[in-house]
Amino acid sequence: DVSDTTTVKFFSVDLAGNEETVQEVVIEIDRLNPVVSTSLASGSYKGDQSVELSSTKEATIYYTTDGSQPTTSSTVYSSEISITDTTTLNYFSVDDVGNESTKKTVTVIIDNQAATTSSLLASGLYNTNKAVDLTTNETATIYYTTDGSNPTTQSTQYSNAIIISETTTIKYFSVDSVGNIEAVQSLEIEIDKQAATTSSSVISGSYTSNQNVALTSNEITTIYYTVDGSRPTTSSLEYTDQIAITETTTLKYFSVDEVGNEEGIQ
């Protein structure tokens, strides 16, 4: 038995003593399995990709792209494999004497879709400082500006909530791990901490006839009032029309604007 690579030399001598020329046979024992590698690692990529397969020794490489396990009846690799959408590539090789490599898999995810960045705070009018949290639906880097200019990848990189203490336009976008760029988005935060000013059509004083008091504000508000001298609250009467005064009265009133700023009582 020959168990490893061996050169066997032999000759024969017939009954009359004639000697044959020495012959030789080289028996090569190859138990080494080939190893197949790929030019592309498993992962996410932007745009179409080409995958090259190579073997550590002379061998035939077989592969599939439908997720099934390859056999010697599968497609024979001959040139780069074009990957145009997310694909699981399974492959192995068989050398000339039948040694098989380990079957391997590479998963190529084609991602041409930019991430979507969202703000937990909507555009609008607010009466206190606000913290703007930005989140993405996948791993991405967010860039933003607060001066109204369009952000670029040279702009401030988002890491923590953005504190807004005055009226601000935040513009932002994200770049995902494979380089897809999101369209720029905007968030308009208007900070209004100033209460409205309410005016009365009648000033304090003495009058010889009944008076109708009209109350007006310098912005859209809800006006609350009392006519019994008590301090008004948001549970008091809500002003809708002129208040008829037919006897000596102390009218107290204040307003609350759309974002909740409360005026001092007048």
Image (cartoon, rainbow, N blue to C red):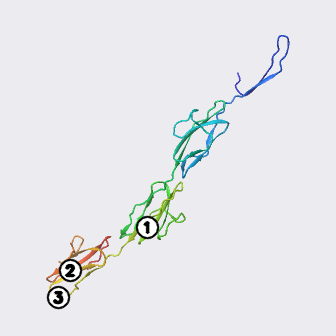
Query: How far across and how far down the image is residue 262, in percent?
Result: 30, 74
**Residue at the spot of label 3:** 207
**Which residue is at a point 35% across and 75% down the rendered structure image?**
194
Dot 1 amino acid type: Ile
Query: How far across and how far down the image is residue 16, in percent?
Result: 85, 11
Of callouts 3 and 1, the N-terminal one:
1
Dot 2 amino acid type: Leu
Residue extending furthest toward the right = 17
Q: Nearer the viewer, mark 3 or mark 2?
A: 3
Q: Of 181 and 132, which appears nearest the observer?
A: 181
Residue 94: numbered disc: none
Image side of residue 205 versus residue 188, left or right: left
Disc 2 element: loop
User: Cβ–Cβ below 8 Å for labels 3 and 1?
Assistant: no
**Residue at the spot of label 1:** 163
**Residue at the spot of label 2:** 251
Dot 3 amino acid type: Tyr
Distance from Cα at disc 3 to Cα at disc 1: 53 Å
Q: Is residue 188 above or below residue 96?
A: below
**Which residue is at a point 39% across and 70% down the rendered structure image?**
190
Distance from Cα at disc 3 to Cα at disc 2: 15 Å
Image side of residue 254 versus residue 90, left or right: left
